[in-house]
Amino acid sequence: MKIKKAVFPVAGLGTRFIPATKAMAKEMLPVVDKPLIQYAVEEAFDAGIEQIIFVTGRGKKALEDHFDRCFEVELTLQNKGKKDLLKQIQELVPKTGTIVYTRQNEPLGLGHAIWCARDIVGDEPFAVLLADDLIQTNKPVLTEMVKKFDRFRASIAAVMEVEKDQTDKYGILDASQLEKNIFRINDMVEKPAPKDAPSNLAIVGRYILTPTIFKHLGKKKTGAGGEIQLTDAMKSLLKEQPVFGYKFEGTRFDCGDKAGFQMANLAFALERPDMRDKLIHFIKEIQKDF
Ligand code: UTP
């Protein structure tokens, strides 16, 4: 079965980014000149996704407007002859009817946000993308995961190795390596202290899940941080179905964290020919003061 739907939970409070996120979803923060959510939506369409499901909270309006047409701006760009910019903003609007919005009334956790999309997803496997996990790579992660799904026909989470003292920031795997970048997950723990971590393999924000996950999310078990965690539901899913880990190639930036966000901006800006030289010059200059 083809993966046609992708869920984007965008209802978190983004407390690490207050005050920027007081009235706006953190997924609308721009890296260089594109909001985080646009990178994730483009990754999903490139992987063959046909329907985008946003689980929103506050900041919904800016997000909706971003993926809608804006005739005023279009007209102005047209009148000024700015054809490239006009094309850009027209192309980022998905075909009518491909975006669906639902609301998470209370920020009860990532697991709960995904559960809010259960009726829209229905009885088919689907993708989940956390836009604040931005990944710089030549091998787009969701596209690779869709290929793995075609092979294994089972749930898959994107994973990466983290420093041993960082395990308390992630869902950590107990897993057996099957191939160079494929793991069979035996168990998982949400945010373990380094001494309790079964490995340094951490889950990051790309998943393909079978619809059975909704049964486990529906138990609404409260886990780490008092939130309904996706990791707990996946742990329970493991008891009835295999779940795999895909170790992706590339660099992941935690854009929900202020330092991670700045690093992402620098890394993505350095890829732009129009900015690269200026930035390198600036870095060399300020480096003298380090
Ligand atoms: P985070 O764990 O980063 O939480 O969420 P957060 O609330 O957004 O941010 P901080 O920790 O307070 O700074 C991971 C993803 O899950 C979504 C977020 O929007 C983000 O994409 N999420 C989280 C929800 O949609 N609902 C929730 O209740 C919690």
Image (cartoon, helix red, strand yellow):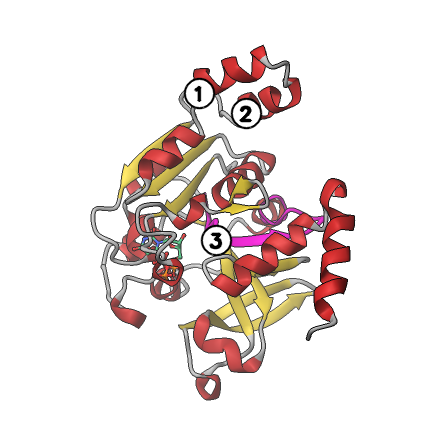
User: Between disc 1 and disc 2, whose residue precedes?
Assistant: 1
Label 1 vs label 2: CA separation? 9 Å
Question: Label 3's element?
Answer: loop
Task: In the rendered structure, find residue 21 and report the number of the disc placed on it.
Answer: none
Residue lying farthest to the top in this orientation: 79
Question: Label 1's element?
Answer: loop
Q: Which residues are magenta?
A: 126-145
Q: Is residue 156 visible?
A: no
User: Between disc 3 and disc 2, whose residue precedes?
Assistant: 2
- Residue 290 sits in which quadrant? bottom right
Q: Which residue is mark 2?
A: 89
The crowd level at tag 3 (other Cα within 10 Å; few <14, some 14-19, many 20+) is many
128 inside magenta stretch: yes
Q: Are marks 1 and 2 in contact (CB under 8 Å)?
A: yes
Q: Which residue is mark 3?
A: 132
Task: Residue 28 in the image: state x and y as whole percent.
Answer: 44, 43
Task: Residue 171 in the image: state x and y as whole percent.
Answer: 45, 69
Q: Nearer the viewer, residue 99 or 199?
A: 99
Q: Which residue is mark 1?
A: 70
The crowd level at tag 1 (other Cα within 10 Å; few <14, some 14-19, many 20+) is few
At label 3, which amino acid type do we have? Asp
